Image (cartoon, rainbow, N blue to C red):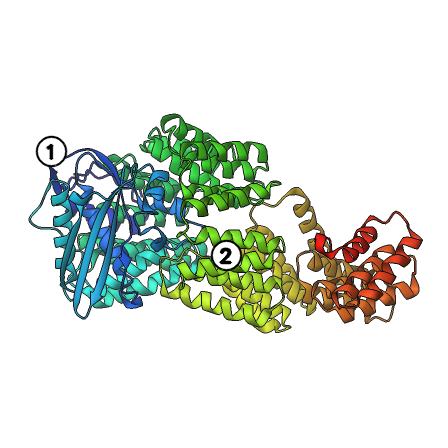
Amino acid sequence: MNDLKFILPVRRLLLPLICAASLGVFAPQAVLAAPPPLATQSPAAQSLRLVVMPFRNLSQNREDAWLSESLSESLTQALTGVENLQLIERNQIQVVLQEQYFTQSAFADPQSAPELGKLLGAQQILLGNFQKQGQTLLISTRVVDVKTGQILPEFATQIKGSSADIFALQEELSRSVLKTLRQSPRLQMARMTESSPALQHYREARDRARSETPTDLQSALKQVNQALEQDPDFARAYGLRAELEARLALIEPGTRQQRLESALQDANRALQKGAPLDQVYLALAQVYFARGERQKGLETLREIWLRDAKNTDAILSYLQASDETPELQIQALRQAGADLEDPWVALALGNRYLKQAQYALEPDTSSALFWLKKAQSQLPDVALIPLRMGEVYTLAQDFERAEQALQAALRLEPENFLLYFLAARVIFASPNPQLAQTWYEKSIALNPQFGFSQMNLGYVFWRQGQTERALALFKQAEALFPESAAFSFVRAKTLFMQRRFEEARVYLLQALERYEKDPTENISRGAIYFKLGEIESNANDFEAAIRYYMLATQEERQFQSWSYLKLSRIFALRKEYPEALDYFRKHLRSSGFRPEDDQKRDQASLYLLEQVQLNPDNVLLLNELGRYSLQDGDFTLADRYFNQALSSGTENLSIRYNLALSQFYQRRWQQATQNFLAVLAQEPQHEKARYMLGLSQLRAGQTEAAIQTWQELLKMNPQHTEAKLALEGIKQPEAGNLP
């Protein structure tokens, strides 16, 4: 059947489009009428670039948390029709917040908000908060000038009313804000639904839908279903459900056909009931991409770009679904009508290609760098761009250029505490971690109330072994944000490093609970599940570890990859080799960028698993599997492999030494000492075993025995540097040289 072509000036003529789509014959060629603006420009109004932040919940009631996004989005929609007002899109805000473990409340005060606004290129930033007292809802807004950091009193608003009529309050809020901006609002503002419970479920679904994890998409689908139970005529809810079904079809092949049919039906319902055309087109495009019909998906997105050539949501939707080379992607976007010359679109492309490179086995950072440089040529004063370029160079392991780019960003905004924080996070893994410490300290000096800088600097000191300084900073951070899931998670990580697993588990479960309470927490749930899996694995509860690792495979890609690796090792230890190989191959498929040495080790691990399946009692193979586990910190698994190899009855000094080393890292000093002694009983000249024996004795409080062990080592090898330093450290402990 030939594709049908439509000229669609009005909504009712779009209905055949959906019907044709269900038959696989959709090819829209349309020019759509733009909706009337929600407000008209008055002569006195001035042009500005504005960001509307999610509203702060002063009541701290979890059941009211959905209002944070609802109030900000309804206000954003009211401002969308204002001429000479450029609103910063939500996805641009997420570029700064994502992967930083921030809670959005960290930017709800006039001291922190301007620094975020500067990074986004905003001139002004609108802050809001709400407080529920009984049945009364009090809502306030303020506008902060980004350049001066001053609150502009002429733009302040405050309204209150019954929380039972949230729609009337949203309309009153929009009118009040438009009035302060010298705008003339329309007398009637379209409502999405008349049901407050339906709106709550819809907003919570929208928040979950921003994630790319299967777990959150399923949760969003559940919420939107509840919204439709409350209001069967909720047009936007049908549009969102169509989008969710299409996205799930891409990642769940087993349910693809059923989900795609459901998505088409929901898109049809959304259109019939009056959903915004752009929302329907986005959902339809997702369906076509999921069906592999790339051209139809592009033609559908073209209908959006005919109305708004700078719509980055449509651009990112295409890039997410496309598996073509960046060159072909850009060519297709240009032909479809997307405006790729706009610097903010270029920045969005640079961010997307950077994220894509971070997940690639062999990252190509050239596309990200090209678009970031293109954006920078038109926006030379936006510090976010060189910050992102620093990330690109770091990914490419060009640390010199990374540092130069980050320094360039800081020169643009030398008093921006947030920029110092972000730059420190980028440079932390470089050969110059001292610079990260300096920038964290500068961030704290500029804004002691931010909290996240104290948390990260504490982690730096913890890794350096400066426990007291680290704990002091953690306490400062927790005092500033006592309900932060991110802080609970970092505390758990530090306790895990001390092998205080019971305490670490408490903090991780606390982090998980807090994550569920605050939808603005940007901490990764996958990270929490993964760390819980590690704790249970180290506690020898492999069934519990498997459960947590399986949960982590439903989260972000990096935690999927690492969890598949852990699952592979557990199943190999249980001699369930087909499952172990399956999970290891999933690990390789889902891995992001790994250095060349790591890639070689991955291939060696795959070979070992294939060989041990053929010869499960080969002690050399078991030793190698244990050694890889040891290198990755899987000490419990490493122990099992080494003991399994030694149980064959063949004494192997390398395996015995590796077992002792694993026990040493687990702080099991007595067992480590016994096994190092067993190695030396058979090979007295084993210098590594003798040096490590001394360390085990010292850690166990047997200082005199350690001194004797290292003195014997120096008799064997007078040039042994580590033994000399160890003895000097014991003689002069005040110098801080204890090994």
Whether residue 107 sits left or right of residue 370 in the image: it is left
Say how many tags the image has. Answer: 2
Instruction: Give me the residue at 76% from left, 58% from top.
Output: 624
- The disc placed on residue 44 is 1
The answer to whether any part of residue 559 appears in the image is yes
Tag nearer the camera, 2 or 1: 2
Q: In which quadrant will I find the N terminus? A: top left
Residue 466 in the image: state x and y as whole percent: 61, 55
Whether residue 141 sits left or right of residue 629 in the image: it is left
Residue 734 in the image: state x and y as whole percent: 71, 55
Q: Quadrant of residue 530?
A: bottom right
Residue type, label 2? Leu
Does label 2 or label 1 sit earlier along the sequence? 1
Residue type, label 1? Ala
Residue hosting label 2: 473
The answer to whether any part of residue 686 appears in the image is no
Q: Quadrant of residue 430?
A: top right
User: SS of the residue at dot 2?
Assistant: helix
Residue 232 in the image: state x and y as whole percent: 20, 64
Residue 4 in the image: state x and y as whole percent: 26, 41
Q: Quadrant of residue 241?
A: bottom left
The Cα–Cα distance between marks 2 and 1, rounded to whole angstroms, is 49 Å
Between 290 and 194, the one lying in front of the other is: 194
Instruction: Give me the residue at 71% from left, 64% from top.
Output: 638
